[in-house]
Image: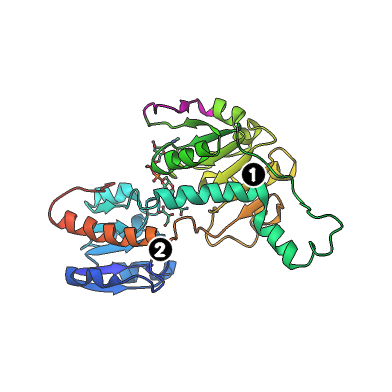
């Protein structure tokens, strides 16, 4: 059985061990795969693992032996599920590996907007404090979160974990989820009501046809001009041109993003010019604890599939 890992490096930059897959078959692990090489590397595979390397219709229709795709992530928007289903290829993801890590990061992004700790540390190292006339100074308003409203779009594993931390900070939690049933202790709102009443809006829904560019000029116009937008789900949830405009016009206070429309970010991304937009390079998931869980579950997903069990199957 030929097992091809198309982009192993980000999951395992040599601090984990792929050898746990060794007795499953012949394992070929590529650190990364460019778009031109995807087909050549995939076409004889029985099993493919991908994190962010896209597997589109053309690729899936030209892999005659392919039986199983393991997505080394929770979000599985890189796979064309319609074609996978048609070709009878099983697709599994890894739900829940990063619930704590990713929600912790969402709050870290929010706290950075509230306090600009990285910036003030740099100012101190640049001797701006030692030269200062007063015993303290700040270059951005400090923001207290207690009593403010956190609106969460997508109230699944990560959304609920973010809500728990935000609640411990004294925030009121509201959420919008197209599918989740009512959750005790939290208030479900329509999308419009969430947008207009939240002080902080955190995106924790998957990227689908419905959520693609969910944040756009119409939805941004419904937000408070003091609102903070947090996105560590998927970049394509946001129309970045519209967001840049809202941030520059003072229609939104700030955004903090760990994901962008194109990754790595394009040099001409308009958000790079927005001073009130923090951007980090898709690292919310990257604790070693969380990555170890991805690796272990990805193996058990394959073992379960071979034993005829449908665990973590998205198709
Ligand atoms: N930046 C990163 O490193 C990471 C990002 N993610 C992203 O976070 C997303 C959420 O992960 P989990 O909470 O673990 O998934 P989950 O499946 O537990 O929760 C997603 C929630 O979104 C809801 N949802 C689906 N469509 C919606 C819509 N149109 N409007 C509102 N809500 C909708 C679902 O009903 C579900 O409750 C993943 O799909 C992935 O894209 C996940 C892990 C790491
Ligand atoms: O798990 C996910 O969905 C991520 O984006 C990290 O790879």
> Does 297 appear above or below 11?
above
The answer to whether residue 112 is seen in the rendering is: yes
Of labels 2 and 1, the one closer to you: 2
Q: Position of residue 48 (x, y in %)?
A: 28, 63
Choose top left, top right, bottom left or bottom right for residue 133: bottom right
Q: Which residue is mark 1?
A: 243
Q: Position of residue 284 (x, y in %)?
A: 48, 55
Identified at 84% across, 60% down, the residue is 132
* Other-residue count near label 2 (Cα within 10 Å), few / some / many at <14 / 14–19 / ≥20: some
Give me the C-alpha separation between circle 2 and circle 1.
32 Å
Residue 276 within the segment the image draws in magenta: no
Q: Which residue is mark 2?
A: 288
**Magenta-colored span:** 181-191
Identified at 18% across, 71% down, the residue is 25
In depth, the one of 58 and 307 nearer the eye is: 307
> Does 26 appear above or below 272?
below
């Amino acid at each position: 059985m030929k097992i091809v890992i198309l982009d192993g490096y980000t999951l395992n930059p040599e601090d984990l061990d792929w050898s746990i897959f060794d007795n499953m078959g012949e394992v070929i692990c590529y650190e990364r795969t460019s778009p031109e090489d995807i087909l050549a590397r995939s076409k004889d595979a029985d099993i493919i693992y991908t994190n962010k390397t896209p597997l589109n219709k053309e690729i899936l229709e030209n892999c005659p032996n392919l039986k199983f795709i393991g997505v080394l992530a929770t979000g599985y928007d890189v796979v064309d599920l319609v074609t996978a289903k048609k070709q009878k290829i099983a697709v599994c993801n890894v739900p829940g590996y990063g619930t704590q890590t990713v929600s912790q990061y969402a709050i870290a992004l929010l706290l950075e907007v509230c306090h600009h700790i990285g910036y003030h540390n740099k100012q101190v190292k640049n001797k701006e404090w030692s030269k200062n006339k007063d015993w303290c100074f700040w270059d951005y308003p400090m923001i207290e979160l207690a009593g403010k409203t956190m609106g969460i779009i997508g109230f699944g594993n990560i959304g609920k974990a973010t809500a728990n931390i935000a609640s411990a900070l004294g925030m009121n939690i509201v959420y919008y989820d197209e599918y989740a049933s009512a959750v005790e202790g939290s208030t479900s709102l329509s999308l419009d009501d969430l947008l207009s009443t939240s002080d902080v809006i955190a995106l924790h829904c998957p990227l689908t046809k419905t959520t693609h560019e969910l944040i756009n000029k119409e939805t941004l116009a419904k937000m408070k001009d003091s609102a903070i937008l947090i996105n560590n789900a998927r970049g394509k949830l946001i129309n970045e041109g519209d967001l840049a405009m809202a941030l520059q016009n003072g229609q939104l206070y700030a955004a903090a993003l760990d994901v962008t429309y194109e990754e790595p970010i394009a040099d001409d991304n308009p958000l790079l010019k927005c001073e009130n937009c923090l951007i980090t390079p898709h690292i919310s998931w990257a604790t070693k604890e969380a990555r170890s869980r991805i690796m272990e579950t990805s193996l058990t997903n394959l073992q379960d599939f071979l034993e005829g069990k449908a665990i973590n199957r998205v198709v």
